[in-house]
Amino acid sequence: MFRRITKFCKQLFDNNQTTEETTPTGLSLSVVPRQDHSISRSQMSENAIKVLYRLHKSGFKAYLVGGGVRDILLDLQPKDFDVVTNATPEEIKRLFRNCRLVGRRFRLAHIVFGRDVIEVATLRGHHVDTEEKISKTNAEGRLLRDNVYGSIDEDAERRDFTVNALYYDISDFSIHSYGGGLEDLHARTIRMIGDPNTRYREDPVRMLRAVRFATKLGMTVEEKTAAPIYELAPLLKDIPAARMYEEVLKLFFNGHAENNFNMMREFGLFQPLFPLVDSLLVEDPKGPATKMLQVIMKNTDARVHAEKTVTPAFFYAAILWYPLTQRADDIALESGLSLYDAYYAAMGDVMEQQCRTISIPRRFSTPAKDIWQLQLRFDRNQGTRAFKFIENPKFRAAYDLLLLRADAEGGSVAKSASWWKSFVEAGEEQRSVIARSSNKGGSRNRNSNQRKRRKPANKTATPTDNND
């Protein structure tokens, strides 16, 4: 993957036409002319080029920026093509009838071409106290609102990592590389622009981005960039839960779930997102919860690489299964409810607590609960009842979770999973044989796995005289 960028960097260092400059704040800048780099417009989205040219022909500066430039240089297929310009959001909207403005924290323009959306941002500037340029931070230094506009140099200084501070100028097809971004691409290094401590406090999600870029690009987080993460990881608790849901999708549903999980735990970033799960991992590092997490991450990566669907409903049902069982046990002991009823009560508790840090949409949390409920019915539906049970729309997902539990727990769960696996994989005739043989073993008491509530001891009331 890095053969192409290695060749390009060699050209960069050997070619005298590349200009070296420094921004007013001391950030280095290399401007690489068209003849000295390998990026071609044919590698870009046709719609992104349309946006760039319309902005340029209307008298505005326009650049392809960030991941689009970075991934082309790494010979990867960019997922998105983002554009920055010195036009304000309102000016952009006047240029494009297919534009909608979004966001309060960062005001952005989305240029819509059917399913393809080109995101256009106005170049960001530094915070100044004026009425026109508005920014706001909280007591911890986190940016709450940031609509401060500026120049390309200021915008680069505001970006997170050097490998993302790469701009393709549509006016002359040159590349503007800030902070040694091209050199860091070659060195496979994730380096923060500016003081890492301050930048993480401005936006704690940058800590997750450091992990995600490192695993996605096969890079290493530079020592000074990594150092503050251990201390500042708890700041993620203050990030809106809806935003964290989107970040989790990027971390665990893009083919690098296992590496991201391991790196997040190393930096202490997993606990603020999944406190219930993390407490079990700390309590029993070799227990079933740990085994389950490892298998989930590997299986999710395998499905992504095989271009199979991955649903958040199953992911959350699996990752939260052992916090659910622990909570159900606690409720059963505290309230005297049967374990079956305790599970139903625990489902709402566990999902509610998880949604405090990650806002799981109801379209996924409800099916996750359905998958949990079916776990309680596998033993009860062996035998001839199995034919009707497998027709449940959520059976396949619940069955997959049962197999994961069998690998993590063994014992009676593995025995149940083995029966269901033989039934599911058998033909129609063989299924009938398996079902009948199971029935001959004796019918199972529907409430055999439920705890009986103890009746409270009768107390003999002492009669009192009513002398009124």
Image (cartoon, helix red, strand yellow):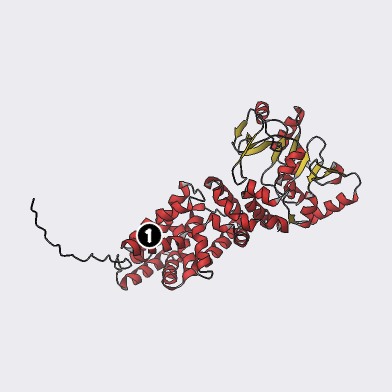
x and y, in percent, of residue 21 in the image: 85, 43
Amino acid type assigned to the residue bearing label 1 in the image: Tyr
x and y, in percent, of residue 154 in the image: 74, 39
The residue depicted at 77 percent of the width and 53 percent of the height is 184
Task: Using the rendered image of the protein, determine whether residue 339 is visible from the camera's viewpoint.
Answer: no
- What is the number of callouts on the image? 1
x and y, in percent, of residue 302 in the image: 59, 60
The residue depicted at 29 percent of the width and 69 percent of the height is 443
- In the image, residue 98 sits, relative to residue 358, either above or below, namely above
Determine the residue located farthest toward the left in the rendered image: 467
Identify the residue position indicated by label 1 in the image: 343
x and y, in percent, of residue 3 in the image: 80, 56
- In the image, residue 423 sits, relative to residue 351, either above or below, namely below
Q: In this view, does 365 lie to the left or right of 49?
A: left
Closer to the camera, 227 or 95? 227
Q: In this view, does 23 lie to the left or right of 298?
A: right
Q: In which quarter of the image is the N terminus?
A: bottom right
Q: In this view, does 117 lie to the left or right of 443?
A: right
Determine the residue located farthest toward the right in the rendered image: 16
- The picture quadrant where one finds residue 285 is bottom right
- In the image, residue 206 sits, relative to residue 110, either above or below, namely below
- The picture quadrant where one finds residue 227 is bottom right
Closer to the camera, 120 or 441? 120
- Label 1 packing within 10 angstroms: few (<14), some (14-19), many (20+): many
Q: Is residue 351 left or right of residue 85?
A: left
The residue depicted at 67 percent of the width and 57 percent of the height is 215
Task: Using the rendered image of the protein, determine whether residue 96 is visible from the camera's viewpoint.
Answer: yes
- Secondary element under disc 1, as helix, strand or loop, is helix
